[in-house]
Amino acid sequence: MNTLRLMKKEFRETRTQGVIFTAVIIFFGATSVLMQKFIPQLVPENLAEAFTPSLAAGLNDYVGNTLQIGSVVAILITISAVAGEREGGTLELLLARPVSKAQVIASKFLVRASYVFLGNIVAAVVTWYYAYYLFESFPMGKLILSAIAMGTVTSFVVGLTMIFSAWRSSKLTAAFWSGGLSLALAILPTVMSPYDLISPFNYGDVARRVLFQEVTALGYLKNIAVLAGFTLFCLLLAYYVFVKSERIS
C-alpha cells in the first residue's frame, strides 16, 4: 500500500473534516467583508456613525479571522490523525499492512493540508465576490496569493499538531500541547523581539502585506519557503516521535 492509496483511504474517512474546515473558514473569514458592510445596521443608532464601512478593514479582518480560526480548526481536524487511530485501536491494524511509518505520517498530513489549501482558496473566491458587489473591484489574484500564504501558515499548524498526535494516545492531550505551543509561537515575538525569526506566524504576515502593500515575487516566495521549511521540520519530528512511540509500545 503506497502513499497515494493511503491518501485515498484517508480522504474517504475524513472528507467531512474538509467540508467543515471550508465552511468554518468561509463563515468566519470570508464573511468579514460582508459584516464590515453591514456593521452600521447591526449596532445601536447612536453608535452607527462611529463605524465607516471599509473594504480595507474587511480584508484585514478576513486575514486575521482566517488565520486565527483556521489554526484552531486545523488543530481539531489533525489531533485524531494518529492519536485517534490509537484510541480506536486501528493503528496496529494499519501498521500491520505493507506501509511504512513515513508513509502514514505523509499521507495524513497531505490530506489535511489539501483541505486547508482548498478551504482557503474557496474562501478567497467568496471574499472577492463580497468585495466586488458590496464595495469595489479588487484583484482576485491578490486574494488567491493571500489564501496560499494563509494555507501555508495553517499547514504548519497541521504539521505541528502531527507531532503531538504521533506522540500522545489522547486526542485531548494532543490538542492541549499543540494549541499551547501554537499560541506561544504567536505571542512570544510580541513580547521578546529575538523570537521574530523563529516564529512561523511572523512570516505568515505576507498574507496581509500582499493585499495592502507591494510585495515582490522573491519576497513572497521567500516567506512561503521559510514556512514550508518549518512545516517540513515538524513532519520530520513527527515521524521521529512516531517511530520512537511505537517502539516503546
Image (spheres, grey):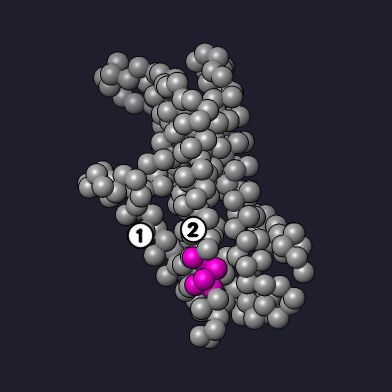
| Image side of residue 87 versus residue 9, left or right | left
Comparing 140 with 61, the one in front is 140
Residue at figure coordinates x 42%, y 22% from the top left: 213
Locate residue 175, reporting x and y percent. 44, 63
| Image side of residue 195 versus residue 210, left or right | left
Locate residue 177: give its quadrant.
bottom left
> What is the magenta segment's predominant secondary structure?
helix
Q: Is residue 66 magenta?
A: no
Q: Residue furthest top?
A: 136
Locate residue 221, reporting x and y percent. 52, 35
Residue at figure coordinates x 62%, y 48% from the top left: 115
Comparing 206 with 23, the one in front is 206
Q: Tell me which numbered mark, 1 or 2, is placed earlier along the sequence.
A: 1
**For the magenta stretch, what is the residue range?**
237-242
> Which residue lies under the disc numbered 2?
233
Residue at figure coordinates x 53%, y 61% from the top left: 235
Q: Is residue 239 magenta?
A: yes
> Which residue lies under the disc numbered 1?
180
Relative to 118, say whether 176 is above or below: below
Residue at figure coordinates x 64%, y 81% from the top left: 92
Distance from label 1 to label 2 (Cα)?
18 Å
